[in-house]
Image: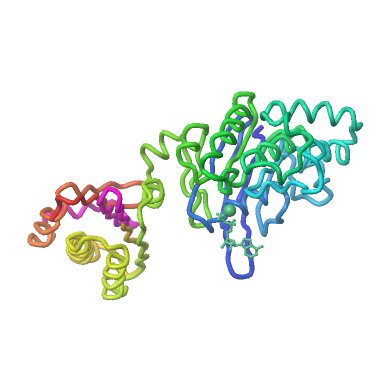
Amino acid sequence: MSMISVKHLCKAYPNITPLKDINCEIERGEVISIIGPSGTGKSTLLRCINCLEHPTKGEIYVDGQNILAAGVDLNKVRQKMGMVFQQFNLFAHLMIIENVMLGATDLLGKTRQEAYDHGMELLESVGMAEKAFAYPDELSGGQKQRVAIARTLSMNPEIILFDEPTSALDPTMVGEVVSVIRSLKEKGMTMMIVTHEMKFARDISTRIFYMDQGLIYEDGTPEQIFGNPQKERTRIFIKQLKPYHADIKSQKFDFLGINSEIAQFMHKNLVPEHFRDASQRLFEELFMQCVLPHLPATFSAALDLGWSDRNLLLEFALRYDGPAYNPLTDTNNDELALLLVRKTAPELKHRYENGMNYLEVTLKTETK
Ligand SMILES: Nc1ncnc2c1ncn2[C@@H]1O[C@H](COP(=O)(O)OP(=O)(O)O)[C@@H](O)[C@H]1O
Ligand SMILES: [Mg+2]
C-alpha cells in the first residue's frame, strides 16, 4: 500500500483551476521534488494533501485511508504530515524551545518535561541547540527555517511537505537548510518538496514531478527529468528557456496571428533575426506546406519555441495527433518546401509517441 495515493484530484477556484487531474502514488521513504513554473498549483497540491484546502473532486488516501471521506479526524491526519513553509511561521513572542515544544504539549498531550527533552534533542539535530532560549527575531532566515523543521519533527510526522523551504533565504543560508533536509533523507523520512533549486532537487530526490497545465505533466527519476525529459514543456523549463506556445486546432487556424506572435516573442526576447526567420520558415514550409494538408478538419497540434539567451539556441517543436506521419520522408511533399526545411534545420527529427507526432530541432547560432 502506498503511503499517499492521489486519484483524479481537481481543485477549482472561481477564476482558475490550478489542479485539473492529479494522479500520483508516494511510497514510504521517497523524496519527491515538485518543480514547475509558478502558478501551476504546486502549493495547492501540498495544501490539498495536508487538508488545508478541500479539493473540488478526486480522492486522497493516506496509509489507505480516504482523508476526504466524511467523519475523518482531520487533526489526526494532519499530525502524520508535517508542513514547512517558505515563511517559517514561528511565534515571535515565544522562545525557540517554546516554539518547538508547543505542538507536543498542546496537540500530542506530552508533559512539559517530555516536550522539552525531545525539543532539545531536535534542536541539536538541526544545529540550533545553542539558540534554544533566543527569540525568533534574533535568528537569521536559515536558522529560523531549521527551527521550523525541528518544530515539524516534534510532531513525529510520517511525511514532511516542504513548500519552497529555501525561497525566502539569502543565498548564503540555503546550504544549511539543504543539509538538514538531506540528513532527514538519510534517516528515511518521506518528503515532498516544492523547490526552485534545481541542483538540490536533482541531488536529493528519488523522483521528480514536473507540474504544468494542471497536471503532473511529467514525472521520473532525476536522471530522466533533468537528463532526458520527454516532453517539450518540461525541456523548456529544465533548460530555463523562454517559452512561446501556440495551440492549433483546425485547418482554419489564424496563421497570420501566430506568425506575428512569433515575431513579437522574438522581438521581446531580443532573439537574433536569423532565428526568427528560421522558425517562421520551418513553421511555414514544414507545417503549412507538408503537415497541414495531411490533417483532418479539426485536430490537436501545437507549436512550441524555447529561447535560451545563455546558450544562444532556439528549440523548435511541432506536434500533431493522428496516425504516424513523417513529412520529411514523404516524397509526395513539395520538393522545394522540403529542401528549405532541410537547409534550415538539417538535424530536424520526427518521432511518434502515444498517438502524437513530434518534429523537433534545436537551432544553434551557426544555423543561418
Ligand atoms: N485561495 C485561492 N483563491 C483563488 N485562487 C487561488 C487561491 N490559491 C491559489 N490560487 C491560484 O491558483 C493558482 C495556483 O496557485 P499555487 O498553487 O500557489 O501555484 P504555485 O505554488 O505552483 O506557484 C494561481 O493562479 C493562484 O493565483
Ligand atoms: Mg507556491
Residue 16 seen anywhere in this rendered image of the structure: yes
Display coloring = rainbow
Residue 286 visible in the displayed image: no
Tell me if 107 is positioned left or right of 81 in this view: right
Residue at horizontal 80%, vertical 47%? 74
Q: Position of residue 303 (x, y in %)?
A: 32, 61
Above or below for 126 versus 81: above
Magenta stretch?
306-331
Magenta span includes 132: no
Q: How far from the left and from the top, in percent, is residue 62?
A: 71, 40
The residue that appears at 20% across and 50% down in the rendered structure is 364
**Quarter containing the N terminus:** top right
Relative to 61, 166 lies left or right: left
Q: Nearer the viewer, residue 14 or 193?
A: 193
In the rendered view, tell whether residue 210 sits above or below residue 131.
below
**Between 54 and 292, the one nearer to me in the picture:** 54
